[in-house]
Structure formats: structure tokens, C-alpha cells
Amino acid sequence: MARLPLEGIRVADFTWVWAGPFCTLQLAHLGAEVIRVETSTRPCITRLIPPWPNGQSTGVNSSGYFNQYNQGKRSLSLNLKKSEALELAKQLVAKSDIVTENFAGGVMDRMGLGYETLKQINPKIIMISLSGYGTTGPEKEYISYGPAQVPMSGLASLTGYKGWRPMHVGISYGDPNGGLHGAFAVMCALMYRARTGKGQYIDLSQWETSTAMVAEGLLDYSMNGGQEERDGNHDLHMSPHAVYRSAGKDRWVSLAVRNEAEWQKFCTAIGQPALANGPRFSSLQARKQHEEELDAIITTWTEQRSPEDATTQLQAAGIPSAPVMSNKDLSTDPHLNSRPIFTYPDHPEVGKKQHVGIPWQLSQTSLSVRKPAPLLGEDTEYVLRDILGYSTEQVAAFKAQDVLT
């Protein structure tokens, strides 16, 4: 069997919440041994929030949120307020390839685990900080949290209905986006180290990685001094382009007509070919001018069909279209279930539950989720004995001194 892409790479993972763990989840998917450094005295926030099985928390190991984004990892429990635990963390770094953290700027330095310290322990170490604001600049020590990333990036100013205030996008977008950028940067640093033998420090700002995803808003200002008006699901350059009510309770279908050729096909597909060349809708400019009227005509058609039927009919005509999926829709979708996106890790406390697995596959390297998310401290003895070389008696002594809590 082919080696996994990151097999043999070890990650000392000091991250928590979402951005950092989402970064290290990608590394675990690719075969790295990711060891989360945790503590029961201040467990990761995501161990304490829903969803829980049957709607009821049974403790720090039952959160679906945590168990989703920490698949394939290990957990080492250390009380870093103890000098002995801090020394153990440094010993882990000495035997690792990557260190990850996503605290506010300066936190790791104050803990005694900053890059300048760690590179003295392991000159080849690659360290990434996924902070909210970056490690330089006047706001480097500001605290950041996911919901703030959307308005900070400018995305909220582009999101919302005409005449409405800026709106959120439904998730803490900056977290997973920063995590994916972080995983990419780490792999670039690994390639650099393979060529030069040198480690390096990666300074990632979640603010900046979010801003990079909506740069067209910034470009509009820099080129034209403008700020486009919020306009719901509509698009400046395509019409019709929106989400339309369908048959059924709270059922919707999305569609986009990208050019004049598709407009002609769309009108035929909905049984109104005469619309295509009518004076109110024969050009993009005309359709934008009469967009409210056009939406009403389309809604009359979509309301008579389920999202699935509307999608099938429009896709047959070459029109991009899809149902607006609910959680149930995603879980049971025949297409998704025909592919390996879903996984059912057997968690020792929660049992087998459907999780999102690895959203890509390599033709020459078989990838799969290798283990469920770890119980808090599940791998503490393994790390101390098998990686750091401590005896069973020494591990017991650490436990007695509350070093491993």
C-alpha cells in the first residue's frame, strides 16, 4: 500500500476552537500524527457545545462539533501551568515536525512556547500561528473570534438584501477558511524544509485570509471608489440569479443564467420561449431593470415543482441549478452517499455517527479517516512512554503531581 502523503510527520497541536483544529484536521487526513495538547482544567470550547447525541451532553467527549473536526487525532492532557508539563511540551516539540497554535498574538511567547524558544529546541521545526490579526501591527494582541471575521473581511458589507443592514453569512467563515489556508502554508513549508533542511515560522492572519476571499469588493473601491449596494441573491453580471421558492414547506431552488445563450434555453425550459426576446427581458440590462417582475414570473414556475424536479428540468437544459439543501437532504442525498465523503467512525462514548470525512481523493494514495476524535487525554500515556521514553512509574508520578490534567 502506498504511503500516506504526510506519513511520518508529527504535529504538536496547541490549537483549539475551530480555525486551528480545522488546519490540523487536513494534516491528519493526509496521514500526519496530530497530537492535541489539551487540559481538563480548561477544555477546548468545542468539547462543551452541541450537537450532542440525542440532544444531551454526557461530558467533554460527546460533542459532535469536537468529534467532527478532530477525527484522526490524538489527545495529550497537560497542565501547562506546571513547569514539569511545560517541559514535557517542549520535549514533544523536540520530536515533532510541526507546531500549530491559534491564540492571540503573544500568548505562546508568554507561555514560554514561542517560536524563538522552540527553534532552539528543534531547529527544523515548522511553526504556524493562526491568529486573528497576525503577529505584527498595532492590533496584533487583539482577541478575535469567528463571528467577527465576516464583518472584518468586508464580506458582511456585501451580504444582505437591498436597503438592509450588513448581514452575517450563517457560519464563522473566517475559521475554516483560515484553517485551510494554514494547512496549505504548512505543506509549502514542509516542501521548503525537504529542499533546504530548514524549518520556519508561518504568521497567518485570519483577517487577511478572509479578506483574500472577497478581494473583488476591495478592487471595486480601489478602481472606482465605490461600494456596491447589497442586493440579496442577485448578481451584477447574471440575471436571473437567485434562490426561488419551490413546492413544499420551506423548499427552495437556486439557479443562475450566465449569458444570453443560457437565457434562451432557460425560457424554453420553463415553457415561456417568448420571454427570451421580449423587450423587458431581451438583454441583461433589461432583465436587471425588470428583475423584480422577472423573479415573480420564475417563482410562479418553481412553486409548482419540488426543488429536485426543477433542478432536473433545468440541468437537462444546461442551466446551473440545485436544491437548497437541508441537513436531512445532505445526509440522505443519493449522489453524496455514492461517494466516500461520509464516514462513520466508531467513537467509544458516542458510537457510530455520520460525519463528514475527507472531501477529496487521490488516485494513487487511499485516504480514509483512520480513527474517531480522541477522548480528552486518551493518548497521554502513549505520548509519554512511546514518544518521550518515560517509564510507567514516571508517568504515574506525573499524574500524582497533577502534571497530566
Image (cartoon, rainbow, N blue to C red):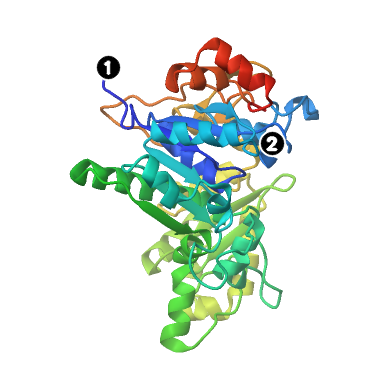
Label 1 element class? loop
Q: CA distance from mark 1 to mark 2?
A: 37 Å
Question: Neighbour class for label 1 at 10 Å: few (<14), some, many (≥20)?
Answer: few
User: Looking at the image, is 236 positioned above or below residue 379?
Assistant: below
Image spot of residue 25 (x, y percent): 48, 36
Q: Quadrant of the C terminus?
A: top right
User: Looking at the image, is 67 positioned above or below residue 394?
Assistant: below
Residue under label 1? 1
Give the residue furthest to the left. 195
In this view of the protein, can residue 342 be seen by the observer?
yes
Question: Neighbour class for label 2 at 10 Å: few (<14), some, many (≥20)?
Answer: some
Tell me the kind of residue under disc 2.
Answer: Pro
Q: Quadrant of the N terminus?
A: top left
Left or right: 67 with respect to 96?
right
Give the residue furthest to the bottom. 225
Left or right: 163 with respect to 387?
right
Residue under label 2? 43
Tell which tag, 1 or 2, sits nearer the viewer. 2
Label 2 element class? loop
Tell me the kind of residue under disc 1.
Answer: Met
Image spot of residue 130 (x, y percent): 50, 53
User: Residue 344 sits in which quadrant?
Assistant: top right
Left or right: 240 with respect to 190?
right
Q: What number is the disc on residue 324?
A: none
In this view, the residue in front, 208 or 327, is 208
